[in-house]
């Protein structure tokens, strides 16, 4: 969790605690009024859990100030989208960012992801990753620490072989045809994808270009343990953890999944891309 998000939670919790104290009731009494466990009141007040809109409405009513619900929800909306600008994150190079991802994936059991234009970092070969990291360093004008960044990205992939984890990843077929580096780099990368089909912790789906779709692919996103969504744009990493956003992104993933090809069908799509690249 970003420090900005945690600070925001703590500030919201402090406001909740203030309203409770002004009402002259303790946490035990408030929990009884709300029908909650005392631990939930404690977690919300101390910033260890993100409140829902319903939580805030109930809290405001229980402490006798329902008119404060709007203010509390405004604070919540400020939490729901947290931005981490890439220029700031990459000020010391790519390696520290990749190291952070290693930790995040190690503590995550289930990931649902979708990428529309690039092979996900979890599946990249060193050569493919190197090309992308060099391009991004040039774009962002960040320090060049490519070797260390590639090594860190490869360390992240160790989670693919840890029992108890599950990575449900969708890739739009167009990403298989977007040439990164040269034909040799792409051939190795596509072979890597084929090798992941059948890995027990990986469910790799390819969304075909010609598949009927209930919605069109927009941008990539990642859902961590059904608790947090991460969206990467050109200049910013966005994080969402509200129930509404998790439900929305989960629904988008489900609809993309309906159109995805798995197993032998996915293998054929990857082979088609490999043949196309070899012929250019």
Image (cartoon, rainbow, N blue to C red):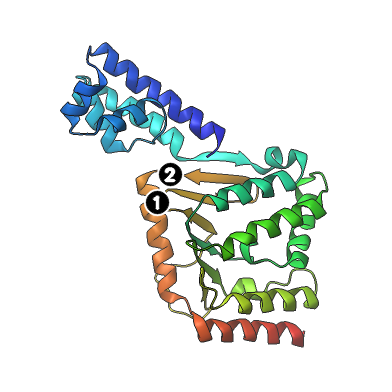
Estimate the x, y position of residue 151 in percent, counting from the top left.
Answer: 75, 56
Secondary structure of the residue carrying tag 1 is helix
Of the pair 60 and 17, the residue shown nearer to us: 17
List the residue tagged with mark 1: 246
Count of numbered circles on the image: 2
Can residue 59 be seen in the rendering of this structure?
A: yes
Q: CA distance from mark 2 to mark 1?
A: 6 Å
- Residue at numbered disc 2: 241
2 or 1: tag closer to the N-terminus: 2
Quarter where residue 182 is shown? bottom right
Residue situated furthest front in the rendering: 163
Give the residue at x 60% y 40%. Answer: 84
Neighbourhood count class around disc 1 (C-alpha, 10 Å): few under 14, some 14–19, many 20 upward = some
**Left or right, 276 with reference to 79:** right
Q: Between residues 219 and 227, which one lies in front from this camera angle?
A: 227
Q: Quadrant of the C terminus?
A: bottom right
**Residue shown at 16% from the left, 27% from the top:** 33
State left or right for residue 37 relative to residue 251: left
Is 114 on the left or on the right of 50, as rendered? right
What is the crowding at mark 2: few (fewer than 14 residues within 10 Å), some, or many (at least 20)? many
Q: Is residue 66 visible?
A: no
Provide the secondary structure element on which disc 2 rests.
Answer: loop
Q: Position of residue 80 (x, y in %)?
A: 44, 39
Asked whether disc 2 touches disc 1, contact meaning CB atoms under 8 Å apart, the reply is yes
Please say if 53 is above or below 45. below
Residue 29 picture location, percent across and down: 19, 21
Q: Is residue 11 above or below residue 220?
A: above
Instruction: Identify the residue shown where x is 56% and y is 39%.
Output: 83
Q: Which mark is residue 1?
A: none
């Amino acid at each position: 969790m970003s420090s900005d998000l945690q600070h925001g939670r703590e500030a919201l919790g402090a406001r909740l605690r203030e309203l409770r104290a002004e009402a002259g009731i303790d946490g035990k009494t408030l929990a009884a009024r709300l029908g909650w466990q005392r631990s939930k009141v404690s977690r919300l007040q101390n910033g260890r859990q993100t409140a829902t809109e319903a939580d805030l409405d109930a809290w405001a009513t229980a402490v006798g100030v329902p008119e404060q619900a709007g203010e509390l929800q405004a604070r919540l909306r400020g939490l729901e989208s947290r931005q981490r600008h890439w220029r700031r994150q990459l000020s010391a190079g790519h390696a520290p960012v990749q190291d952070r991802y290693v930790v995040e994936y190690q503590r995550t059991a289930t990931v649902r992801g979708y990428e529309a234009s690039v092979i996900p970092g979890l599946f990249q070969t060193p050569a493919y990753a190197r090309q992308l990291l060099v391009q991004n360093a040039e774009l962002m004008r960040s320090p060049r620490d490519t070797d260390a960044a590639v090594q860190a990205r490869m360390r992240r992939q160790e989670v693919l072989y840890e029992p108890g984890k599950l990575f449900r990843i969708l890739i739009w077929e167009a990403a298989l045809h977007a040439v990164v580096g040269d034909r040799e780099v792409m051939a190795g990368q596509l072979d890597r994808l084929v090798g992941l089909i059948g890995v027990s912790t990986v469910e790799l789906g390819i969304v075909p270009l010609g598949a009927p779709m209930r919605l069109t692919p927009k941008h990539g996103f990642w859902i961590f343990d059904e608790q947090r969504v991460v969206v990467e744009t050109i200049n910013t990493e966005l994080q969402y953890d509200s129930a509404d956003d998790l439900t929305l992104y989960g629904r988008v993933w489900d609809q993309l999944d309906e159109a995805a090809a798995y197993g032998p069908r996915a293998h054929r799509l990857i082979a088609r891309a490999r043949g196309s690249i070899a012929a250019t």
